Every structure is written in C-alpha cells, then in structure tokens.
Amino acid sequence: MSRTLPIASTLALGFVAAFGCSAGPQEEVLVAVAEEFQAPDVPGAILFESKSVDLGETFQHHQYEVRFPFTVVGENAIRVQELNTGVGFTLAHLEPPLLLGDWIPPGTQGAVVVTFDAGRYKADKTSLVSVRGDFESERVELSAEAFVIPVFEMEPRIVQFGEIILGDDSPQKHSQIVVVTALKEFKVLQWKRTPPGVSVEAMDGGVVLNDGRAVQSFRVTAGPEMTEGRMSTSFIGETDLGVDLEFMVNADVVGLVRYAPSSRVAFGIFDQGQEKKRYIKIESVRGAVVVPLPTLTLEGDAAKVMQAEVRTVSEGMHHRITLNIGKRAPSGSYNGVLRITYPEASGLAPKEIMLNARIRSSR
C-alpha cells in the first residue's frame, strides 16, 4: 500500500535546484515525478561507481574533496537518511543538493561528497563514510585511502636538554640543532610561542632537494635566565606555508642545591599513638657549590607536633633532614612550612617545603 508524501512541494523545489533554474524536458519530468511522488513499498537501489577512492599523496593540515558518484537504479526511488563519517572525513553531503530524507527518483545521478582533513595524520590513512537509508542494501560503506606527508619533518622533534643547573651560562653545553625538512622553501614569519629562557635562530645554509623539498636548520639555546623546575613546552612558528612549525623542548632546570622531596612532605593519615618519620635530602648539584649546614625553622600548626633535625652526610656536599612526629602527638590536622636557611655568606637562597599530617583519634 502506497502513501502520498506531505512534502511534495519541497521535493519539487529540491529537484529544480539540483538540475538547474531553467526547466528543460528532463527537469520537467523530474519535477512532475516529485510533485506526484508516492513512497514505494520496495525502494530501488543506489549504485556507486566505486566504493573506494585512492587520494594518493596528501599533506598534513590540508583538506581534500572526495566524491563518490552514484546512480539510482531499479524501478523505484530511494532516499538517504544518514551520512556517518569516520575519523578523517568531515562535511558530508549529497549532490545535486538534496536533504537527507528526500526521496530520489530512479535514474537520478548524484554523488556523496565528503571532505578529507589530513590533520596531523602521517603515512597511510583510511577514512570511512557510512551511507544509510531506504534502498536495497540499507547500508553502504565508502572509503578513501591516502598517504599523508608531513608539511614539516624535524630531527629531533623533541629537544632534550636534560638537567640544567640554574644560572649556568655555558651555551655550548645547552645548544642543539633542529633540522627541518619542509615540502618546499619556507620562512618563519614570527614565533608565536617560545619556551621561557630558550631562544631559536635560523642558521645559514638552507638547501632545496631534487624533489623540491627544502631543508632548513635552527639553533635552539637554553639561556641562563631559565626558571627552576621541569619544562615541557614547544616552539610554535607561523610560516608562509600557512602551517605552523612546532617542536617540543624538554628540560629539568635545577638550582645549585637539590632537595628531595623538593616541595612537599606528607605524613598522610594515621592513628594517634604512632610515631612517624620523614626525610629530606639536601645535596650540592654536581659539586657546583659548597652547601653549609642549614638552619631549620618549623612554622604553622605543624610546629606543634613535628620536630626537625639535620645532620651532615658529606661535608659541604650532602645533608639529611629528619622530620619526626612522636607517639604523644594529639589528634588533628597539621599543616605548616619547613624553612631552610643558610649563612648569608654562602649566597644560597632559603628554601620552603610544605608539611602536612592528619592524626586520627585513638579508638
């Protein structure tokens, strides 16, 4: 049993738009079919010229239109209800311009059109689009294969400076070369992001290879103005190729004195009546400085239950702090700071380490 569609006028406008503004014989037939169209009990079939497209070589950060031409075959119309794109495919639609859910008369030639976004993919990449609707097979899987070539290839991609002593101004120790191979000659218009205390400069001697790719080297230098702590960030350069050049920089910038743990000592949660100890190691980094025996000060609530003492392990090189909570400490939450200071003549900055403990009432 057939039923008349309530959207006949909409379909008529759709087919006129699809096949041109001026109505020829074929267009008049299509409009007439749409105006009088009835949904078939058994839909026709959608026949694709090919269900797989090979895009060949593509480039990262570029987009490519992919077309899957089809013909509606059989005696009855079909309609496409869904175009579900997989990773890599975006912006799927039907041509001639049709809305999903429109009935498409037999004999109509069109295409499923999607956009392949190469993004940051590399080497072989397969993307899928699933076509679902009222047609003979109900579902068709279409695919595109591409070999994605990076716009920029770097060696190394991550600059590893390792451990750097704060204030070390020996650039020959903390300078590395990054070799960039681009799809063609390029210029860095501006560096949109640079790691704090790290500089970059283009080196002379760039070359163009036989295949048109260009090789350019950059010198990356960690300067003495870097701040203490672990660094993991990147350089981002705007280029005239329309794609940013980006590479990572990792470093562990340490002071002349190393503390372990460096920022916080936690006793955790424990029952009243227990004794707990924690330790802090102080040592000269690579023997760069003589570390005298420090003075310790406990501040905050932690001072009510904690005791701190320091002893020398290796004169001028290594000391050990013991933090102790005795068995008689009352229950409660205790937070505070351990302040470590040195004689002014040493030139060493004071250090503060956070402390916390929670003691439960005995049962």
Image (spheres, rainbow, N blue to C red):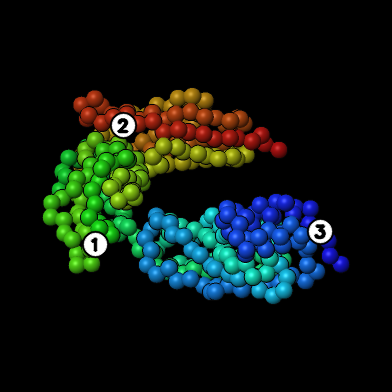
Whichever of labels 1 and 2 marks the residue nearer the N terminus, that label is 1
**Tag 2 residue:** 294
- Residue furthest to the right: 1
**293 to 38, vertically: above or below:** above
Asked if residue 281 can be seen in this view, the reply is no
Q: Earlier in the sequence, mark 2 or mark 3?
A: 3
Quadrant hosting residue 107: bottom right
Q: Amino acid at mark 1?
A: Arg
Camera-near label (1 vs 3) is 3
Distance of mark 1 from mark 3, alpha carbons? 61 Å
The structure residue drawn at horizontal position 43% and vertical position 56%, both measured from the top left corner, is: 63
Picture residue at 16% right of the left edge, 43% below the top: 170
Q: Quadrant of residue 70?
A: bottom right
Query: Which residue lies under the disc numbered 3?
Result: 4
In this view of the protein, which residue sits in the foreground, 278 or 132? 132
Amino acid identity at mark 2: Pro
Q: Indicate which disc residue 213 carries.
A: 1
